[in-house]
Image (tube, rainbow, N blue to C red):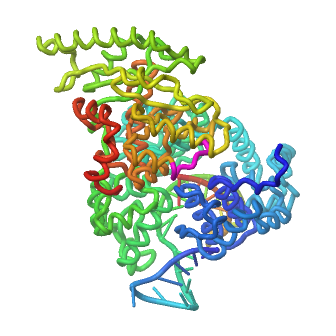
DNA sequence: GCCGTTTTCGGCCCGACTGTTTTCAGTCG
């Protein structure tokens, strides 16, 4: 296109992390000491979740300090950032067939087995492995048998059926059902969710459940006998693992009565978080496992009774740590924060007083305006802002100013009714103490040409405006950023909805200059949205954390397109908690009166905030 | 490969389950 040679685009954090991940895998396949592969994977995790654009930092010559990245991996990051390549990775690829790496995804196949079949049978891909299993070649390898062949074929079949990770709402529904089903096992006291679901990650791989029970074997039997179990991966005395027909793997751990504390810690924290906790236990002379704490000096083999705890809080206290919320247990600074007494007091669903973003049948929603309002009222909200799309978003049948005026009349009539009913004490069950009002807003399109889709005098008629960008997503970074910053600068725009424009597992974040966006949002007091739709969860947890650190306000919204989706706010709260958010950063924790005053006062807001608001943490 | 006011070298988290070479290595979470 252009005549001038341009530097290659800087690799994203995701691309850098993928390369480190691949180096880790290939080193493992080569049989390197396990700590090297661990180091590369740990670095990959840190890079993937870093809030700064790492390649940009390296290109500009300053090497950011990243936890778990030492001299060797820092050099690798520098090389990739400037050249877009990594010589070490290319050498490894020459040495180890890339297809061999795919084998690691098969359940039951690890690096040793992959290398073994490669060396003995020349297997270099999943297809090769399938053929070797089908023709009975596997059993000719010392250490492998006909049974191994069957398990390999089952593993490959399961891999093909597997449809990626679960969205949070799907995982939640499944977990709720499993808790009921497994709770019916003889001896069951209670069933608890653990793992990445309990940490409320954006997507969920396997489901981990704990069952406190007097009869562990009955619990495992109950799991194996569930109606939609397709295959049993493991079924022991204390643990079971199955794959459901949907392809989802469910792991069940049994817990002796009264010992849940260390079990919950063990099966909730990320691997890295757990390693850190065990390191701390070790420093203090104890070995920590799910079973409890055992003194390090207890002779190996001697059956030292582990020290157990009923609750997680007690088990944390044994290490002189306060309770760390599940969403924080990722080894992203939470242990240091706990030690220094600066863990955040995370926002909760009950802190939210209303919802700033929803749609009706007037644009791309399903339900009538009144139904949306009534549903929010019954959820105890003090307010709901109706934010249908503006004209230029044709696919959503966006509204023109005349139609918005018609909506306003409907909103006003509904509110008159709410006022009258509240005065008469005639309110539906679930209503909140402050009554309910439907507020009128819009989801203002930030057009491809950079203009806002409604004139200032129309925007001034709304109670609150959320702005977002749906078209022209592929424009260059400078242009995209300019469009969003322009919207942020409008005296009428209160919230930027789904700022990254991503869709989970479908579409990456917009290529924005995030530091510039945070700065503009913080300076003008424009809130950034945490969109709770399970398809979006936008912003991501790491961007949320960076935004709050930069002094930004947030809005946690459902973006509901039908009444039941008002509950998506819950997922937004989970996401915000993963971003270390406290209630003081969230505008829809404000009362209705304060929210309206906040929205009306945008032009003065920056000045006010500068003088009264406390620092980002 | 990373890391350290107890270490610049020598550590690095821990247990269950499976299959097989039957005493333990490999895999997994």
| Left or right position of A435 against B13 | left
- Is A503 part of what is drawn in magenta? no
**Residue A324 x, y percent position in the rendering:** 34, 57
| Left or right position of A487 against A304 | right
Residue at 82% x, 50% y: name it: A125
Q: Magenta stretch mostly in which secondary structure?
A: loop
Q: Quadrant of residue A603?
A: top left
Residue at 62% x, 31% y: name it: A449
**Residue A254 x, y percent position in the rendering:** 41, 49
**Residue A344 x, y percent position in the rendering:** 32, 55
Q: Nearer the viewer, residue A210 or A207?
A: A207
Q: Quadrant of residue A53?
A: bottom right
Residue A305 visible in this rendered orientation of the protein: yes
Question: Quadrant where the C terminus of chain A lies?
Answer: bottom left
Q: Nearer the viewer, residue A13 or A173?
A: A13
Question: Quadrant where the N terminus of chain A lies?
Answer: top right
Which residue sits furthest left? A424
Q: Give the vertical position of A118 relative to A191 (above or below).
A: below
| Left or right position of A88 against A121 | left
Looking at the rendering, the stretch of residues picked out in magenta corresponds to A509-516
| Left or right position of A76 against A582 | right
Q: Give the vertical position of A168 relative to A424 (above or below).
A: below
Q: Give the vertical position of A102 relative to A462 (above or below).
A: below
- Is A511 part of what is drawn in magenta? yes
Residue A34 visible in this rendered orientation of the protein: no
**Residue A372 x, y percent position in the rendering:** 36, 16
Residue at 44% x, 27% y: name it: A559
How many labels sit on residues? 0
């Amino acid at each position: 296109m252009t005549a001038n040679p341009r530097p290659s685009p800087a690799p994203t954090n995701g691309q850098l992390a993928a390369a480190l991940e691949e180096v880790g895998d290939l080193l493992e396949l080569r049989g390197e000491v396990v700590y090297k592969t661990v180091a590369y994977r740990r670095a990959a995790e840190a890079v993937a979740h870093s809030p700064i654009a790492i390649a940009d930092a390296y290109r500009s010559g300053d090497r950011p300090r990243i936890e778990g990245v030492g001299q060797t991996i820092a050099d690798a990051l520098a090389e990739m950032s400037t050249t877009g390549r990594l010589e070490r990775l290319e050498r490894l690829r020459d040495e180890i067939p890339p297809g061999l790496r795919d084998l690691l995804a098969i359940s039951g196949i690890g690096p040793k087995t992959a290398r073994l079949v490669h060396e003995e049978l020349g297997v270099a891909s999943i297809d090769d492995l399938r053929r070797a299993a089908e023709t009975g070649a596997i059993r000719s390898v010392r250490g492998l048998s006909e049974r191994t062949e069957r398990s390999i074929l089952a593993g490959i079949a399961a891999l093909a059926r597997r449809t990626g990770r679960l969205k949070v709402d799907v995982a939640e529904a499944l977990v709720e059902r499993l808790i009921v089903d497994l709770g019916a096992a003889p001896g069951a006291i209670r069933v608890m969710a653990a793992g990445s679901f309990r940490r409320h990650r954006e997507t969920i791989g396997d489901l981990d459940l704990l069952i406190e029970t007097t009869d562990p074997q009955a619990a495992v039997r109950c799991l194996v006998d569930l109606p939609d179990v397709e295959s049993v991966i493991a079924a022991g005395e204390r643990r079971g693992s199955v794959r459901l027909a949907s392809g989802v793997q469910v792991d069940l751990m049994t817990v002796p009565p009264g010992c849940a504390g260390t079990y919950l810690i063990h099966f909730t924290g990320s691997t890295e978080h757990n390693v850190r906790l065990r390191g701390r236990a070790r420093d203090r002379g104890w070995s920590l496992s799910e079973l409890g704490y055992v003194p390090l000096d207890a002779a190996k083999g001697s059956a030292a009774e582990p020290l157990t705890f009923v609750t997680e809080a007690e088990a944390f206290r044994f290490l002189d740590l306060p309770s760390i919320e599940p969403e924080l247990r990722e080894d992203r600074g939470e242990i240091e924060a706990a030690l220094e007494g600066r863990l955040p007091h995370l926002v909760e669903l009950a802190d939210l007083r209303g919802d700033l973003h929803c749609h009706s049948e007037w644009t791309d929603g399903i339900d009538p305006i009144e139904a949306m309002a009534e549903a929010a009222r019954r959820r105890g909200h003090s307010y709901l802002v109706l934010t249908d799309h503006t004209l230029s978003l044709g696919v959503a049948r966006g509204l023109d100013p005349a139609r918005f005026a018609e909506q306003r009349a409907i909103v006003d009539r509904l509110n008159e009714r709410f006022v009258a009913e509240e005065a008469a004490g005639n309110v539906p069950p679930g209503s909140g103490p402050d009554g309910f009002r439907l507020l009128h807003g819009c989801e203002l399109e930030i057009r491809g040409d950079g203009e806002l889709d409604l004139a200032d005098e129309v925007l001034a008629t709304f109670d609150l405006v959320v702005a977002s960008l749906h078209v022209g997503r592929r424009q260059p970074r400078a242009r995209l950023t300019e469009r969003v910053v322009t919207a942020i600068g409008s005296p009428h725009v209160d919230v930027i909805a789904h700022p990254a424009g991503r869709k989970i597992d479908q579409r990456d974040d917009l290529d924005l200059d995030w530091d510039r966006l945070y700065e503009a949002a913080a300076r003008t007091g424009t809130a950034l949205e945490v969109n709770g739709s399970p398809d979006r969860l936008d912003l991501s947890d790491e961007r949320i954390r960076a935004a709050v650190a930069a002094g930004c306000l947030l809005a946690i919204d459902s973006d509901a397109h039908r009444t039941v989706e008002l509950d998506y706010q819950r997922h937004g709260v989970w996401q915000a908690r993963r971003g270390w958010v406290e209630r003081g950063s969230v505008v829809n924790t404000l009362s209705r009166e304060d929210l309206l005053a906040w929205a009306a006062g945008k032009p003065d807001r920056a000045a006010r905030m500068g003088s009264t608001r406390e620092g980002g943490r």
